[in-house]
Image (cartoon, helix red, strand yellow):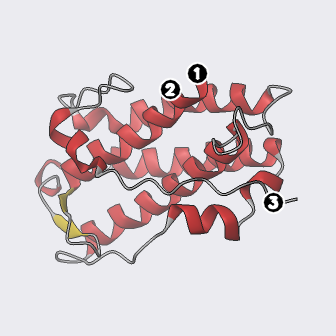
Amino acid sequence: MQPPPIEPDTKDWTTTITDGCAECGFDPAYDVTRTGERLRATVPGYAAALARPDATERPAPTVWSPLEYAAHVRDVFRLFQQRLTLMLEQDDPLFANWDQDETAVAERYWEQDPATVADELAQAAAASAAAFDQVRDDQWERTGRRSNGSAFTVRTLAVYFLHDVEHHLADLRR
């Protein structure tokens, strides 16, 4: 049975690139060359959340379960690896639109197997971390744009991406 819909998040999270995040404590002033390392460091936390007996249960009707958060993060890993690749291979690419709430419903996150999601998340994390590990010094300022006009450099994309992954891990600890 499909759970109640989650209210779409309309906050402009791009502010975390410069301002950090008071909700989760994210500090954007980190060494971006360590993005891959920090992405890999989140995997055990997601694996632990997915191994909990209540991994499929929502803490409130309109708050994602650990399974739904992890499925979302798995897809975020995949998406940002694709976006990074575009930025490194093309000049100022325009990213295809991605609606996270639409994807959650279409992919039926709540019905996915926690063990499978844990494996897929670990694989996606390893691949995206490796991609960020390979960014050369002269590539951090390459650009790309979202369909809403938000502009990124590889550097700011790394910060934005890492915040999302770490923020949702903090969500699971609350």
Q: Residue at x 54, y 54 (%)?
A: 7
Q: Nearer the viewer, residue 34 or 144?
A: 144
Viewport quadrant of the N terminus: bottom right
Marks 2/1: CA distance?
A: 5 Å
Comparing 147 with 158, the one in front is 147
Q: Which mark lies nearer to you, 3 or 2?
A: 3
Q: Secondary structure at mark 3?
A: loop
Instruction: Name the residue nearer the viewer: 51 or 44.
Output: 51
Q: Is residue 46 above or below residue 8?
A: above
**Which numbered circle lies on residue 173?**
1
Q: Is residue 25 left or right of residue 67?
A: left
Residue type at tag 1: Arg
Determine which quarter of the picture holds residue 106: bottom right
Residue beneath disc 2: 170
Determine whether 91 is above or below 161 in the image.
below
Disc with the residue nearer the chain's start (3 vs 2): 3
Mark 2 falls on what kind of element?
Answer: helix
Q: Is residue 17 left or right of residue 104?
A: left
Measuring from the top left, give residue 92's x and y in whole percent: 17, 75
The answer to whether mark 2 and mark 1 are in CB contact below 8 A is yes
Mark 3 neighbour class, 10 Å CA radius: few under 14, some 14 to 19, many 20 or more:
few
Which label sits in the foreground, 1 or 3?
3
